[in-house]
Image (spheres, rainbow, N blue to C red):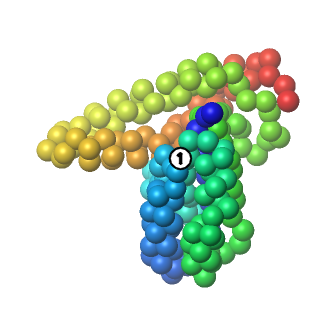
Amino acid sequence: MHAVTVLISRQVKPGCEAEFERVMDQIIATAATFKGYLGAHLVRPGDEQGVNDSLHHVVMAFDSDASLEAWQNSPARALGLAAAAPFIEGQALIRHVSGLAHWCQPRGEPRQAPPPRWKVAVVTWLGIFPTVFVLFLLLGDLLVPWPLWLRILVITLLVVGLMTWVVAPQLTRWLRPWLYAGTTK
C-alpha cells in the first residue's frame, strides 16, 4: 500500500474567491474525518512567488487508493462539490499522482515512463535542500519567536509551493536527459 495524492485545479469566477475558499476549507475539514486522510492544502493564486496563475489548486493525500476512492465516491464530497459549483468556471483539472514523481514529468509533453525512484529522490533532495536553506536564511530570524509548530507549518507550506511550481519544474528541465535516460513507456 502506498500514499496517493490528487491535485485538483479550478478556475474560480471573478469576485467569488472568498466564497470558493470558504467552501474548500469546509470540504477539506470534511475530508479530514475520512479513514486514511493524510492531509490537504488549498493553494491560492499568488501563494507561489513568481507564478502568474489564476487557478486555485487543492492538493489532497490519502494513505491508499481505496481510501481516496472512498472519499471521492462519498455523499459528503458530492455535497461539497455542489456547494462549490456556483463559484467555479469550467471543468476541474484532476491529476492523480503517487509519491513525488509528478514533479519530474515534463509539462506539455506526452507521458513518459516515470524515472526510477532513486532519481526522483535525488532531484527532490537537490530541490528541497537549497530551498529550505534559503528560506531559513531569509525567514529564520523572523520566525524564531513563533511556536515551533507554526514555524514548521510556514516553512513546509513555502517549500511545497516553491518545489511544485518553481524549483522542481526547473530542475526537471535541467536534469531531463539524466532523469529519463533509459526510460520508455
Residue 60: x percent and y percent?
Answer: 55, 51
Residue 160 x, y percent position in the rendering: 47, 43
Q: Residue at x 33, y 46 (%)?
A: 153
Residue 66 place in picture, x, y as percent = 66, 47
Query: Dot 1: few (<14), some (14–19), or many (≥20) neighbours within 10 Å?
Result: some
Relative to 38, is 170 above or below?
above
Looking at the rendered structure, the secondary structure element under dot 1 is loop
Q: Quadrant of the C terminus?
A: top right
**Residue 103 seen from this side:** no
Indicate left or right for 6 with 157 as reference.
Answer: right
| Residue 132 appears in view | yes
Q: Which residue is mark 1?
A: 36
* Position of 81 relative to 32 (above/below): below
> Could you say which is closer to the camera, residue 85 or residue 125?
85
Identify which amino acid the numbered label 1 is placed on: Gly
* Residue at the image position 49 percent from the left and 73 percent from the top: 23
Q: Looking at the rendering, which quadrant does residue 174 occupy?
A: top right
| Residue closest to the far right | 185
Left of 161 or right of it: where is 55?
A: right
Q: What residue is drawn where x is 62% and y is 51%?
A: 68
* Figure label count: 1
